[in-house]
Image (cartoon, grey):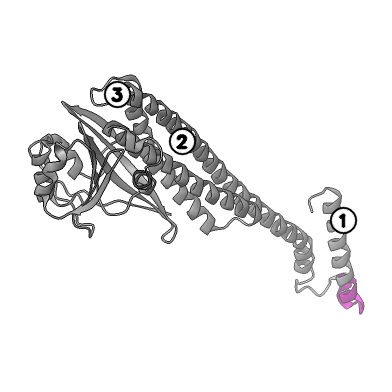
Amino acid sequence: MRSVRPHNTRKAGLSPGTLAERESIGTAAFITIMSYNEASLEERNITNLDELKQYKTSDKVSWINIDGTEDSESLSKIGEIFNLHSLLLEDISIAGQRPKVDDFDDQLFATLNMLSYDDKKNCISVEQISIVLGPNYVLSFQEAGGDVFDPNRFRIRTSKGKLRKSPSDYLFYTLIDTIVDNYFLILEKIGEKLEDIEDALIAEPTEDILNELYSIKRELILLRRSIWPLREVLMKFEREEFEQISPTTQTYFKDVYDHTVQIIDTLESFRDLSGGMLDLYMSSISNKMNAIMKVLTVISTIFIPLSFLAGVYGMNFENIPELKNKYGYYIFLASCFVIIVSMLAYFKKKKWL
């Protein structure tokens, strides 16, 4: 299992608010808009950034999603249209930000990690997503195309639930809630893998299983680094008052915070479980080695008296009493056989075999 994250290429020493130049991830800036109220829905793609100006002052709620944050020119233009703070734009352009929330006058800015599991590549992909809440709009900035927001789009298109009837702060909440809920799916995948590894460890521990276990431990560290700071962010939403979020919507953030605590508890349980499996692997290997050494020790012990006898009668002295006995060879073999049987019986009695 692996994690995938675009590399950050920001240079040291740049002035605050400077947009970072990041390694291209193969996706140009692609902008989609869902503008809606309870009675109507407009869904379209934007190619001319100047068309975004109408959604800044629209009486509808507008969800503007931007895929591809490596295009600094487009980011700057969007920042001019929506009066985004330069530090806000800088955080959007830099991959690997720690989850956080910042209040910029009439805008609320949140950065968090969106995780997804790729079954084909057997890896967890980590993508930074930045969300800006405005008076009647929500801007979501993603590093690349593809996300976990299909349920949100479905609810907007079908007018199911409260989304079409609620202001922009409720949309802001639902996006964060969807990202957090998707963590459960990631943990479910890891839980299944841990169960398979546990069964394999009991049956036959191998080096491949050890490598897979170490890989999962690295993924758990990645998840912990992504989720623990999010707890602080959601605690702010729950306990602090933001001008952009109504008391009604703030109540829903308490539920998201509870989900985050549950995810962290599950994550810690998986970490303990993976640590226990590592101990189980080492114990299994040690027991297997001990069993091999016991067999070799028994064999060596049996051959010690036989080697002694062979050494004695292998000496080139003519006055050895049994040397001229025509049955001496058979007596020697019989003696060896008796010694072997006697020692095996003794080991069996002592339960060493």
Label pair 1/3, CB-CB below 8 angstroms? no
Image quadrant where residue 306 sits? bottom right
Question: Which percent across, then down, holds residue 94?
Answer: 20, 44
Question: Which percent across, then down, holds residue 242?
Answer: 25, 23
Q: Secondary structure at mark 3?
A: loop
Q: Is residue 39 left or right of residue 281?
A: left
- Residue 33 lies within the magenta run: no
Q: CA distance from mark 1 to mark 3?
A: 84 Å
Instruction: Say which quadrant the N terminus sits in.
Output: bottom left
Q: CA distance from mark 2 to mark 1?
A: 58 Å
Q: Secondary structure at mark 1?
A: helix
Mark 1, Cα crowd under 10 Å, few <14 / some 14-19 / many 20+, is: few
Nearer the N terminus, badge 3 or badge 2? Answer: 3
Q: Label 2 amino acid?
A: Ile
Query: Mark 2 highlights which residue?
Result: 263
Q: Nearer the viewer, residue 93 or 349?
A: 93
Query: Mark 3 highlights which residue?
Result: 246
Query: Mark 1 highlights which residue?
Result: 345
Residue occupying the point 33% across, 38% down: 164
Residue occupying the point 52% across, 53% down: 210
**Residue 13: in sight, yes or no?**
no
Q: Secondary structure at mark 2?
A: helix
Residue range corresponding to the magenta coloring: 322-332
